[in-house]
């Protein structure tokens, strides 16, 4: 059947068998239908091989066909198959030396919940060519007509082999069966090499709960910190730092919507509820062209879609928080919803007296998602998130008595409407409308008695706000198994109100200004081509991202080239190199050491240029079957026009002249990263080491000389192990080490005898109520960040136990100990002469280190139904 057919067809094209009269009953149908109908009406046998003939392919006749030969020519057009008459039979034969390909596309879903699966591998085991499902579960792959099956695989799911040929009259749906639910704590599983990329981290769904966590709170960003090249600014902070960059240089996307502030409770927890997360992707280099706007990394987080088969829920309780979730179908197999809610319990559990002595803190998160299948080609998603923190510090609190009552409140709100459409088996498009808002409120109040009969109340408040409205489109065009195009664009409307402060005091006594507002438009276009050559051994991914920011008085445009090349070596090895230029139009002006939202988000203006980064990386990776993975990475990043302030500047300031306090400079980040990971078995774990340098250079700071950046950490080590004692019971341990943070110490200190005295008839602005019995000191600083604080390290232990279950109810107990050996790690360090409210209590002038956590146990209980 595989013999060449050209000569045979030339001799038999006028054969009476092919000229036999045949009237098709329909103009549309499958190839198999017309072949069978020809045999039924004419009685002429038709022989063929289904291994290279796509029998279920839908075809359409022109209406002018009147014979068997004419019908066969029409339905076989473009297949590389021709009809030949031999000895009273019709043979359907392949043309000489021609292999035909056809496209298989569709969605990959979980068997039980019908949620789409992101990043699943689909490939032909013979040719070893395939594709990956995109963030909406869609895949498109071309296979030869000799392909008999496709293999589908993904972390946490059983491998699935799908026999071919497949029907193509609608989108194919592949349903993968989850592995034993008790094993969702596996670090990672089988991954085909096409899913791995240096500088890219994709965490499995259950990874967030793998290892011990502070107070038992599962945190996405802290889980990412186990990998090389990532870290935090402070002990146990969720403030993610990537390769020496600042926190504002990370692009955080929640279901495609950017977030400007990601910290709860001084940054100890992130705003991403671990129970609501479905997929986490971190890009450190080789950035895809669709991403832009930040310099260091992209953290792309997708929340759960909701179960389309049955209703399920979960409740989790711990001494610090409570969370609940509910998901289920609104119309079975057509639409589903997911709802999660998390709230802190500290203010409620510890009583009114505790709140009066120490202050009050409360936070909550709400995640909601609705997805609706319109038909097999169209789907709509609606997502919503709101997170809010409230903090109140009374002036008569026990630890640090103050003169004023302070209140902080900050809120994140995001919303998105997504429409995904399969235009053809090769073309998939996603159109998204988004809304993002970050609002920060601060107030202070105090009572003064100017005289015995004239008490005065001072009330002040400050507001800072960022608001975005955007429309974006992303399109994927799978030309073939060796080439895929991605392109799209978008528009974002920005509204910035960096800072405004007002009081109830007359303008003559205090400055009071409305918030300066900035309205601007940001445009974005991108294109990218991914090529796989030399039998998939060489992968090339050239691309470009174009961004433009327009506002009154300034216009900035930036063309950002991207390029990645990877060469696959034998025995599951590869070498990869990449270059990416990134431009950041938004800036965060930071000064505090803790992650309070008192920093200002400001745009590029006529006086402040966008920040730029030129990132280079070289990587090698080796994988042993599915058990072990080794990766080493070298990187270098040049930063241009990065911003800082030459004075204290945050929401407490009452100034609309922040532009005059900003200076530009350069930065240099470079280092190496090492990763060793065991993926499967009863014992799994990860070891990562990062050797890094981060330098900054500003013309008006440190005499124009380079100095270590405040987030420079020379050595970072993370080790984490998990051992499954038996099904339903696992033990885990993690140890983290980080070099001490840079710190500025004065070379000499001089007493300031003019403190609080009248100079030239005016009161020195540094006047203090304690000036009569306290000597002020002036530091003499020769070099910034000339000293290192103590290293930060701690050992954490944890366990997870499944306590047994009925058919529909599961009980899970999680417990552990944070900082087992009670290490006193620096949280805040300051040198000063502290005083109390009593004039005769004066602390000596020295360094003070404040540690936040020593040994701290935790426990939580989860009920799933």
Image: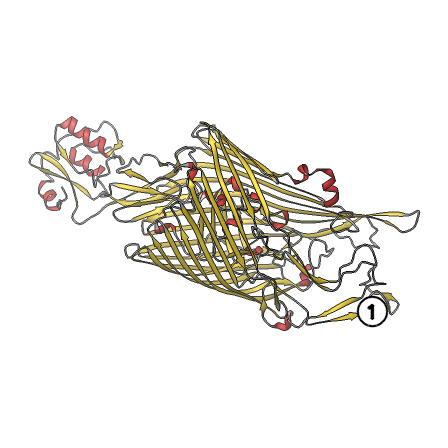
Residue of label 1: 754
Establish if 738 lies above or below 359.
below
Q: Going by the picture, which residue comes out furthest to the front?
A: 821
Camera-side residue of 815 and 509: 815
Establish if 112 lies above or below 435.
above
Inspect this view and state whether residue 518 appears: yes
Inspect this view and state whether residue 607 appears: no
- Left or right relative to 643: residue 536: left
Q: Going by the picture, which residue comes out furthest to the left?
A: 87
x, y (%) of residue 148?
Answer: 24, 41
- State the quadrant of the N terminus: top left
Please name the residue shown 41% across and 53% down the image: 677
Establish if 792 lies above or below 697.
above
x, y (%) of residue 638?
Answer: 51, 65
Camera-side residue of 480 and 796: 796
Element assignment for label 1:
loop
């Amino acid at each position: 059947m595989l013999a060449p057919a050209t000569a045979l067809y030339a001799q038999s094209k006028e054969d009476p068998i092919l000229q036999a009269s045949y009237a098709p009953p329909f103009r549309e149908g499958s190839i198999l239908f017309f072949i069978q109908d020809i045999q039924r009406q004419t009685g002429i046998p038709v022989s063929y091989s289904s291994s290279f003939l796509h029998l279920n392919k839908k075809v359409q006749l022109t209406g002018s066909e009147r014979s068997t030969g004419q019908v066969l020519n029409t339905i076989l057009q473009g297949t590389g198959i021709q009809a030949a008459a031999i000895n009273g039979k019709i043979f359907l034969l392949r043309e000489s030396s021609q292999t035909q390909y056809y496209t298989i596309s569709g969605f990959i879903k979980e068997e039980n919940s019908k949620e789409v699966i992101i990043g699943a591998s689909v490939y032909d085991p013979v040719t070893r060519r395939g594709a990956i499902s995109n963030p909406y579960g869609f895949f498109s792959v071309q296979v030869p007509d000799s392909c008999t099956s496709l293999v589908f695989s993904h972390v946490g799911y059983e491998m699935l082999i799908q026999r071919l040929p497949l029907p193509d009259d609608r989108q194919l749906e592949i349903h993968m069966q989850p592995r034993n639910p008790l094993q969702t704590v596996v670090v990672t599983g089988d991954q085909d090499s096409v899913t791995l990329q240096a500088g890219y981290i994709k965490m499995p769904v259950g990874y967030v709960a793998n290892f011990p966590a502070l107070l038992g709170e599962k945190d996405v960003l802290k889980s990412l910190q186990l990998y090389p090249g990532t870290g935090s600014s402070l002990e146990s902070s969720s403030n993610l730092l990537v390769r020496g960059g600042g926190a504002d240089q990370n692009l955080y996307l929640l279901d495609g919507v950017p977030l400007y502030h990601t910290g709860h409770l001084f940054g100890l927890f992130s705003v991403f509820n671990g129970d609501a997360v479905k997929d986490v992707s971190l890009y450190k280099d080789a950035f895809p062209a669709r991403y832009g706007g930040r310099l260091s990394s992209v953290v792309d987080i997708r929340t759960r879609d909701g179960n389309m088969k049955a209703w399920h829920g979960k409740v989790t309780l711990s001494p610090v928080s409570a969370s609940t979730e509910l998901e289920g179908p609104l119309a079975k197999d057509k639409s589903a919803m997911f709802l999660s809610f998390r709230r802190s319990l500290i203010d409620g559990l510890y009583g009114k007296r505790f709140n009066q002595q120490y202050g009050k803190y409360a936070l909550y998160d709400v995640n909601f998602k609705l997805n609706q299948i319109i038909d097999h080609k169209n789907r709509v998603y609606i997502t919503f998130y709101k997170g809010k923190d409230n903090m109140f510090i009374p002036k008569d609190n026990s630890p640090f008595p103050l003169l004023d009552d302070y209140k902080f409140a900050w809120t994140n709100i995001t919303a998105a409407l997504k429409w995904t459409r399969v235009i053809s088996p090769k073309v998939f498009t996603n159109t998204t409308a988004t809304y993002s808002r970050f609002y920060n409120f601060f107030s202070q109040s105090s009572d003064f008695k100017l005289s015995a009969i004239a008490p005065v109340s001072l009330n002040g408040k400050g507001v800072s706000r960022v608001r975005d409205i955007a429309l974006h489109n992303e399109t994927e065009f799978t030309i073939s198994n060796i080439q895929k195009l991605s392109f799209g664009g978008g528009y974002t409307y920005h509204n910035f109100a960096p800072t405004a402060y007002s009081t109830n005091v007359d303008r003559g006594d205090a400055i009071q200004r409305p918030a300066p507002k900035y309205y601007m438009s940001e445009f974005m276009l991108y294109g990218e081509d991914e090529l796989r050559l030399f039998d998939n051994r060489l992968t090339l991914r050239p691309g470009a991202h174009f961004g433009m920011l327009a506002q009154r008085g300034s216009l900035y445009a930036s063309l950002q080239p991207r390029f990645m090349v990877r060469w696959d070596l034998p025995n599951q090895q590869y070498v990869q190199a990449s270059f990416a230029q990134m431009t950041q139009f938004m800036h965060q002006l930071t000064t505090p050491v803790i992650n309070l939202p008192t920093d200002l988000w400001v745009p590029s203006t006529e006086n402040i240029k966008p920040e730029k980064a030129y990132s280079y990386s070289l990587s090698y990776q080796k994988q042993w079957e599915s058990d072990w993975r080794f990766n080493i990475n070298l990187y270098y990043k040049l930063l241009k026009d990065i911003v800082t302030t030459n004075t204290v500047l945050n929401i407490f300031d009452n100034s609309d002249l922040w532009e005059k306090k900003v200076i530009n400079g350069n930065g240099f980040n470079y280092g190496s990263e090492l990763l060793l990971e065991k993926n499967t078995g009863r014992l799994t774990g990860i070891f990562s080491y990062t050797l890094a340098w981060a330098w900054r250079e500003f013309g008006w700071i440190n005499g124009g000389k380079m100095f270590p950046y405040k987030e420079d950490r020379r050595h970072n080590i993370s080790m984490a192990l998990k051992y499954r004692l038996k099904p339903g019971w696992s033990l885990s341990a993690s140890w983290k080490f980080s070099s001490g943070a840079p710190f500025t110490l004065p070379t000499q200190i001089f007493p300031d005898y003019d403190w609080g005295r009248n100079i030239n008839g005016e009161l020195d602005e540094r006047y203090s109520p304690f000036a009569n019995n306290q000597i002020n000191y002036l530091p003499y600083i020769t070099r910034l960040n000339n000293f290192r604080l103590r290293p930060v390290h701690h050992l954490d232990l944890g366990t997870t136990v499944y306590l047994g279950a009925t058919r529909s109810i599961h009980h899970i107990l999680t417990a552990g100990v944070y900082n087992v050996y009670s290490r006193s790690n620096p949280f805040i360090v300051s040198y000063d002469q502290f005083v109390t409210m009593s004039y005769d209590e004066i602390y000596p002038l020295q360094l003070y280190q404040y540690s936040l956590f020593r040994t701290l146990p935790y426990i939580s209980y989860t009920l799933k139904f």
